[in-house]
Amino acid sequence: MAHEHAAAHDDHHQAPTGLMRWIKTTNHKDIGTLYLIFSAVMFFVGGAMAMVIRAELFKPGMQFVDPSFFNSMTTVHALAMIFGAVMPAWVGLANWMIPLQIGAPDMALPRMNNFSFWILPFAFTLLLIGFFVPGGAPAGGWTLYPPLVLQGGDSLPMAIFAVHLMGASSIMGVINVIVTIMNMRAPGMTLLRMPLFVWTWLITAYLLIAVMPVLAGAVTMLLTDHFFGTSFFSAAGGGDPVMFQHIFWFFGHPEVYILILPAFGIVSEIIPTFSRKPLFGYEAMVYASASIAFLSFIVWAHHMFTVGMPLAGQMFFMLSTMLIAIPTGVKVFNWCATLWRGSLTFETPMLFALAFLFLFTCGGFSGLMLAIVPADFQYHDTYFVVAHFHYVLVPGAVFAIMAGVYYWMPKWTGHMYDEKLGKWHFWLSAIFVNVLFFPQHFLGLAGMPRRIPDYSTQFADWNMVSSLGAFGFGLSQLLFPYIIWKCVKGGAPAPARAWEGAHGLEWEVPSPAPHHTWDEAPSMAVIARGAEH
Amino acid sequence: MMRFAALRSENRRLALKLTGFAAGAFAFGFALVPLYEVLCEITGIGNPKSLARAAEARPDGLADTRTITLELIGNLPSVGNWEFRPVVNSMQVHPGQLYETFFIARNLTGQDTVAQAVPDVAPSKAVAWFHKTECFCFTPQSFRSNEERVLPVRFFVDKALPSHLDRLTLSYTFYDESTRVAAR
């Protein structure tokens, strides 16, 4: 079989060792690991900032930090989590799993793969040393709205170049993903046989390549407005600050689907595995993902209903936003139908996937509420918005990443992780994430604005609950690296097919996956067995 | 890797195409700037550039008998270093008739400077029917330190103004060089 050959090949391959192995590597598994480690580091950096935010908001009044630093915390927390934690985690999982899942020996452009990863540490160093320059780190919000963001200190150009570097890194990363998926599939791995994680990633990659350069353009305009006398967004020179919001959200809305589409893919693999049933409506899932991606380009202005817009515009953006509920509803329906009469077991990946299913849907519902123009005038820039997007991002994207990590960890390390600790991690996370974010709905409906370090006393109780949830959630995440470390060090040996209900080519290679896999394409029979959906 | 050696050039070709796609997306970001102005014009929000240009239309024939209330507002981006206000706060105008009014600006910045007024008309729907034939907002204005000037604006309201609009606001924001973000 192919993997025996691959294992033999591994033995006589002279790979550099030590640090240089990681710096010079062009191996998709090594680079995937690097991305995942980087993502975990940024998850804790951004998480520490969230702890500062919640500590300051624990009770009314100014406690620990000054308002400007507080604003830096909210700004850099968002940038670190979006561009540092979630996106690199997806690219890392794509690097690890896509070649394995489509029967390719590596990514299509291995050297560019190495380059696109190693840009990231520099980008985030540039962003984070903003804390140590005069004026402090950017504090105008992650949306970088002018003119506020232009009033920051010396860190502004650093943050803009950091965004440029992150953009360059992710564009290179996704070019690699597209070329790999389009050109490197094993013979017989037709597009409609690909696992859904590969499908959703392909769609994500196209979204990213279309909008990330638009963000680069927008921040470049900020830069020239500030330093070179242009007036793109300066009313004094005939520009318009509202235009920045349009350009930013033309990027920003597809961006939120970039963060969530691969999650749909992962959940679409985990739920069938632990239901021991094929995914219900595979093709409908593919088309629903593509529809969501298409719609994401025509809904951006729902982020800015309150800036002033013709009635026809408000109606268009409200209705097109609500339209997204249809393909999303198809997906939720299909996941539920997959569970229906399945032989369910509740290992950690399945628990995270089920929590995703329920809590992401909750986040989707509050999104529908925000889509309604007259209601949005009330909710805009309140904690209701904060609750909404954290529901889709934390128990949405982050839980799906954790589900994916637990699901594939046996394949990466060759060991089963500690199931008991995994369950502890899940239950603590699932409980605390709700204690943390659910009360923020109430705060928002009661009128508490977002991005403020101090608040009126009627908001005190739910803020305290939310902060307690945050500390609990933050502490329980410390279990995650410990569980991974323990699994790398040892544990029950994992068979090639680590989960009895798992399908797909990644389960046809041994665990741990050898350094080189699929040097010889999998046979048609193996592909057909993997593609039983 | 052997079976993929033939793919190398194909991979490179697709990667180049995608790089071109990304470059196109970058250019599209900048293309959104003129596109935005066109859209503002079409949707009636008004193009700031057209608001700051002399109208080519002139009043023709008799003025309407209906009366529109025009409110005048002078804004400053920051307090203390300028004085800027309309001579009258509100006027009763007939569509189709040419009017003249004045704003007063005084430079308190303590130095010679150049200032530019940026006009706006509310409600934004009315922009298409509000014509300025002459305005201090069309060009930058030089001020010596402590100089006070009376600045004229000549305008008329189009007779085609929809009948449900009976109250318009003409506002100016007066920026000087030092309030330009770029110069900070």
Image (spheres, coloured by chain):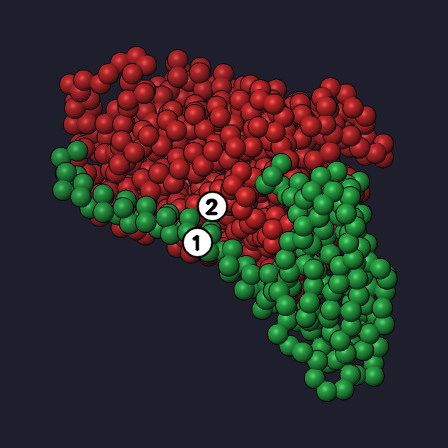
Q: Which quarter of the image is occupied by the C terminus of chain B?
A: top right
Alpha-carbon neighbours of circle 1 within 10 Å: few (<14), some, or many (≥20)? some
What amino acid type is highlighted by mark number 1? Phe
Q: Which mark is residue A217?
A: 2
Query: What residue do we see at 60% from left, 51% from top?
Result: A237
Could you tell whether B167 is left or right of A466 in the image? Answer: right
Chain letter, disc 2 residue: A
Q: What color does chain B have in the rendering?
A: green
Q: Is residue A504 above or below residue A336?
A: above
Circles 1 and 2, Cβ within 8 Å, touching? The answer is: yes
Q: Nearer the viewer, residue A184 or A490?
A: A184
Q: Is residue A283 above or below residue A157?
A: below
Chain letter, disc 1 residue: B
Q: CA distance from mark 1 to mark 2?
A: 9 Å
Q: Which mark is residue A142?
A: none
Q: What color does chain A have in the rendering?
A: red
Q: Are marks 1 and 2 on the same chain?
A: no
Q: Is residue A388 above or below residue B31?
A: above
What amino acid type is highlighted by mark number 2? Gly
Q: Which residue is mark 1?
A: B28
